[in-house]
Image (cartoon, coloured by chain):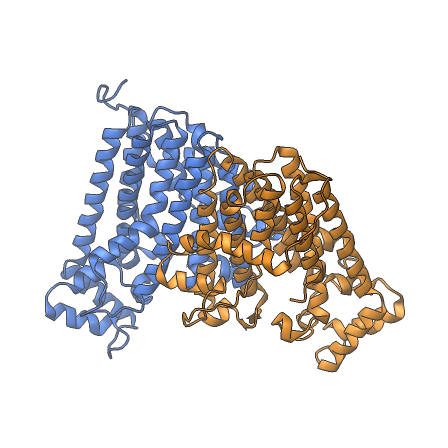
Chain colours: A orange, B blue
Amino acid sequence: MTQHVSPVLFAPSATEILERGQWLVRPALRDATSRLHPDVARMAEFTLGWCDADGTPRHDNAAKGVRPALAVLCAEAVGGPAEAAVAGAAAVELVHTFSLVHDDIMDGDERRRHRDTVWKSFGVGPAVLAGDALFALAVGALAETAPQVRPAAVRALSHALVDLVNGQAEDISFERRPWSGLGAVTVDEYSAMAGCKTGALLGCAAGLGALLGGAPADVVNALTRMGRHLGLAFQAVDDLLGIWGDPAVTGKPVFSDLRRGKKTLPVIAALSAGPAVRAELLDLLDPRRSGTGSSESGFRRAAALIDEAGGRSFTTDLAERQLDLALRIIDEAAVDREAVAGLTVLCDLVANRTR
Amino acid sequence: MTQHVSPVLFAPSATEILERGQWLVRPALRDATSRLHPDVARMAEFTLGWCDADGTPRHDNAAKGVRPALAVLCAEAVGGPAEAAVAGAAAVELVHTFSLVHDDIMDGDERRRHRDTVWKSFGVGPAVLAGDALFALAVGALAETAPQVRPAAVRALSHALVDLVNGQAEDISFERRPWSGLGAVTVDEYSAMAGCKTGALLGCAAGLGALLGGAPADVVNALTRMGRHLGLAFQAVDDLLGIWGDPAVTGKPVFSDLRRGKKTLPVIAALSAGPAVRAELLDLLDPRRSGTGSSESGFRRAAALIDEAGGRSFTTDLAERQLDLALRIIDEAAVDREAVAGLTVLCDLVANRTR
């Protein structure tokens, strides 16, 4: 046991960690997509960032691959080999990719990762099928896990899948909720939604990695919780980028979440500030009020108001708190110091990413 | 062993068999949908035929429930208890229901089971999510199988899922293929597509039932093959109903498959008849030719031509042949005579159904 003994001297870079995860999981993903009908395989490969819509190969890694890296590092953190986590890492990445494809249909989003989304490129019907195919391949990847851990792996993924769907349903239901007053979305409700929509799958990635790495149930549960905290941080950063992100880096339109009228965490927090700020903000954001909400300058003013009202710092603080909780669990549950160093870098990446 | 000994004296009716399957699997399906966000649960329950779009309960069993009945009877046929198959039966029924919801989006179908389809009732985005939820619940149902058979169950379902997606992709790709000449869809290609799109899941229902009922691998494989034959019969009957079905019974428009320009088995078979019939049929069906194809009388004439050219009898014969193959396997592989009687009734129902 080297726990809490040797200091970390050479921590890998975030790029190295992500590339190693991609490199480890890529053959499993290639095997998976090779099982598909050519028409669907093309869409799946486009979605995974391996080619353009016309099939031209790409080598710029459009997908970050946070989840595969997390699964692999968690397997190593509990003393297992990285390779043990590959089937679980592939399953989680396929589920993540499926959910992006279908969410973009539901949300009507036309751009992702600097490209047209799948439904925009291939049509809604084919995009539904592409998502289904990725989902089917995720179950197939799970069938490649070792038989002795497969029952627990199926249970873990099935819970994450139901959370994912329920989180998306809750997020959509927020659109019908009022912007203020009785029935307005609270910070707690938002966090519960984000815990399902984003936290569950990151928790599953970490927990599956630990499970496949040979960890006992209590360590698997701890690292699942760790991934959920990381997921809440991830979602908070996503919300910050949705308002203040650089479109040249995020690949999404400027003020994208404000344009879509999304009630994200910075907005919800800002709306609970003083009545003066709330009134002006509601004029800008609530489409039922007359306002300049739909103009570029209106969005800019709204973003500044949210910042002034403390919505931005509240969200940053929440991300940092969740990151701290995640790091604390890693320090307690993990036994491999090198993997802990890697996980720390990965967590920092999630909290400080710009896309 | 009572095999090949006692004659069956009292065979249950098809209605009794289906109702028993529904009754056995209903609690598992109720448990499953209770895990969903209320908005998604409403759509899932609508899809399963338990309520109208506004939530009013229905008690008329819109879903036939062939797959749950097949799974349960196969568990009994191999000497296991019916209850052992329930988790597998639920998983397969949830996958089937998910695929109907998403296929209706892809095909633009507005009516199913005498009601508006899910996307027509709730919108495309929500219908995508409803299908995803049913899919997620199917994986969850699988997580309820006994741990010692779960690895094999996951493998069986994952194969069926990939076949299902590939079959749907191939079916969609047939729309782009020419009606005649080089590149026209052949009977063999059509059968391979139907084997994936319809056969795989019926095969999975039968195989999972046998597996959960405690059968050895060779019996599981035999009953999986049996289900695939039954699936080919099922699809052939579906194709017959798509042209000659009574809309009052099928719940779909009259000549529905001809309206949609689908290259189904009766059409493909008729087009391989003499050149005179083919020319007139192409005038009626191929939208690139001038013709009366889009009129009610045009569809009626096309249906008559397909019949005269032997497309109807070819399809009926194929259904009967596949049914025979299924019944022969049941007779060889099954040990419980009462379950065999039930399976025989279920197979006859599939081959002689009117909706």
Q: Is residue B195 above or below residue A57?
A: above
User: For residue B77, which quarter of the picture?
Assistant: top left
| Residue lying at 41% horizontally and 48% vertically, measured from the top left | B161
Q: Is residue A171 left or right of residue A211?
A: right
Q: Position of residue B314 (x, y in %)?
A: 17, 53
Q: Position of residue B15 (x, y in %)?
A: 37, 37
Q: Position of residue B21 (x, y in %)?
A: 42, 35
Report the number of numbered marks. Answer: 0
| Residue lying at 34% horizontally and 52% vertically, measured from the top left | B197
Q: Is residue B202 above or below residue B1?
A: below
Q: Position of residue B273 (x, y in %)?
A: 12, 63
The one nearer the camera, B162 or B176, is B162
Residue B82 at least partly seen: yes
The one nearer the camera, A347 or A205, is A347
| Residue lying at 67% horizontally and 59% vertically, measured from the top left | A349
Q: Is residue A7 above or below residue A186?
A: above
The one nearer the camera, A59 or B16, is A59
User: For residue A218, which quarter of the picture?
Assistant: top right
Q: Is residue B29 left or right of residue B38?
A: left
Residue B134 at least partly seen: no
Give the quadrant of the N terminus of chain B.
top left
Q: Is residue A195 left or right of residue B117?
A: right
| Residue lying at 67% horizontally and 46% vertically, measured from the top left | A340
Q: Is residue B10 above or below residue A222?
A: above
